[in-house]
Every structure is written in C-alpha cells, then in structure tokens.
Image: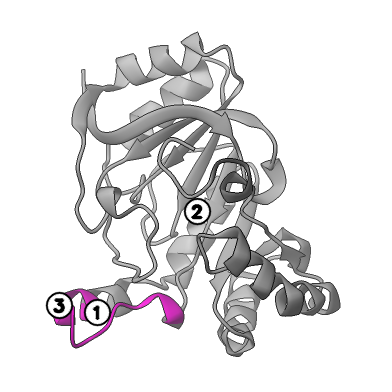
C-alpha cells in the first residue's frame, strides 16, 4: 500500500471559508513546493517533518472519527501523487473531501471542495535571506491555467487570498478575472496569527469586502484555540 509523509492528523472545527464551523478530520501532508514568508505551518513546508503513513490507515482513521468531512491540507497536499488515491478512497468511504491547496499543481482527482489559496506577491520570501526560494516561489506561485483546471475538475470551489494591505487588491482583482469566478466564491483573509492582528485588519478589510462583493474570511481556529498545532 502506498504511503504519504504526514506531519499531523487531528479532529477540529473548520475555521475558514464556506464550511466554517464544520467538525472535520484534518490530514496534513508534509512538504511544499512554495515558501511563503508568512507560512503558519513551517513544520510542513520550510522544515518538513512527519512520518510515512499507509493510505489505508489514513482512511481508517478518518472513518473511525464518525465525521463526514475530511480536510487534506499541508504543506501542499497536491504535491505527492499518492494524494489521488487517498482522495478517491476517502470519497468511496462516503466522506466529503476538501483539499486546501495553493493551486500550483493539478492531479487527476475529484474533490468535493477545492479550497484554493493563490499566493500573491506579498507571500514571496525575502530575496536576500532566501535567494533560491524567493526565485522558485515567484516562478511557481501563480499558474492560472493550473488553478482553472483544479476548479473545473472539482465539485465545488472557493478562492482564498491572504491580504496585507489594500494594495494587494489590484493583483487579487486580476486573478479573479483570469480565473473567471464569482465574487461570492472569493474569501479575503487578513494576514496574522493573533486575535489582535485580525481585529486590527478587519477594521479596514471588512468594509472593502462589503463594497466589492468579496467575502470576508476570519480565522476562527485562532479565536477558538489560539495559534497552535492540532487545530
């Protein structure tokens, strides 16, 4: 049986996007083809750690929870080719599968919800501190045709952007036009891993979302549990 490098699995409540509040089983793969400077899971990207777990074991773990929703996240869960088999077996077991992806890799799989987080210019690591990864990240971060293919292959989709300032919206609006998605499928999240940072950003970000028709996306897992693993 094929295996996947897994950094962690846990039960929690979905804190972002259209399924916020849904009890879910999370499977976090380890490894990523990008290096966002604000990554909040460096143990799955900058310094990927974890164990090789058989796919059938992961499916059994998901089923044993009694939950209906599974979230495949990372790192970048679309990076290992074995994710195709895992997704298929989970759906065969009657699970609703969300894949949290940057949208830079396409696989021959069908998921129930493609949760795509295109990486804006603001995500690029410092070119002086990380010259190699800065260049690779820039090259890889925004393949519109790949994202469009992931959307077309999936049953449902949502697009999530991490915003640092209103200046980011020129790029966001361009990406939304190129992807040809509705505004109400677009979720805007503030950068930040504390309640204070999110509240400060919400004061100017929520009104802008209201004006544009985009949906403001809080990070409820931080409000519920704090910025810690396993949530």
Residue contact between numbered discs 3 and 1, judged by CB atoms under 8 Å: yes
The quadrant of the picture occupied by the N terminus is top left
Q: Nearer the viewer, mark 1 or mark 2?
A: 1
Return the disc, 1 or 2, that comes first in the chain's sequence: 1
Q: Residues within 10 Å of mark 1 (few under 14, many from 20)?
A: many
Lateral position of residue 194 relative to residue 187, left or right: left
Helix, strand or loop status at disc 3: helix
Q: How many marks?
A: 3
* Residue at the right extreme of this rendering: 211
Report the residue marked by disc 3. Answer: 132
> To which quarter of the image does residue 197 belong?
bottom right
Helix, strand or loop status at disc 2: helix
> To which quarter of the image does residue 217 belong?
bottom right
Q: CA distance from mark 3 to mark 1?
A: 5 Å
Report the residue marked by disc 2. Answer: 150
Lateral position of residue 126 relative to residue 187, left or right: left
Residue contact between numbered discs 2 and 3, judged by CB atoms under 8 Å: no
Q: Residues within 10 Å of mark 2 (few under 14, many from 20)?
A: many
**Residue 91 on image: x %, y %:** 52, 23
Q: Residues within 10 Å of mark 3 (few under 14, many from 20)?
A: few
Q: Is residue 170 within the magenta segment?
A: no
User: In the figure, 30 relative to 8: above or below?
Assistant: below
Report the residue marked by disc 1. Answer: 134
First to last magenta residue range: 122-135
């Amino acid at each position: 049986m094929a295996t996947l490098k897994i950094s962690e699995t846990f039960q929690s409540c979905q804190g972002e996007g259209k399924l916020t509040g849904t009890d879910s089983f999370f499977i976090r793969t380890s490894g990523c083809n990008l290096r966002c400077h604000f990554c909040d899971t460096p143990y799955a990207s900058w310094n990927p750690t974890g164990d090789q777990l058989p796919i059938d074991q992961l499916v059994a773990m998901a089923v044993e929870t009694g939950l209906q929703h599974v979230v495949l996240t990372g790192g970048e869960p679309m990076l290992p080719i074995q994710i195709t088999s895992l997704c298929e077996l989970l759906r065969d077991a009657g699970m609703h599968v969300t894949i949290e992806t940057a949208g830079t890799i396409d696989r021959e799989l069908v998921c129930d919800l493609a949760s795509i987080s295109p990486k804006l210019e603001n995500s690029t690591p410092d070119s002086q501190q990380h010259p190699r990864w800065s260049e690779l990240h820039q090259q890889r971060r925004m393949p519109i045709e790949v994202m469009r293919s992931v959307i077309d292959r999936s049953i449902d989709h949502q697009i999530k952007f991490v915003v640092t300032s209103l200046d980011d919206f020129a790029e966001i609006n361009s990406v939304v036009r190129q992807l040809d998605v509705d505004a109400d499928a677009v979720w805007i999240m503030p950068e930040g891993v504390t309640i204070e940072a999110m509240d400060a950003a919400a004061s100017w970000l929520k009104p802008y979302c209201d004006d544009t028709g985009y949906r403001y996306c809080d990070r409820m897992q931080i409000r519920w549990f704090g910025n810690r693993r396993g949530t």
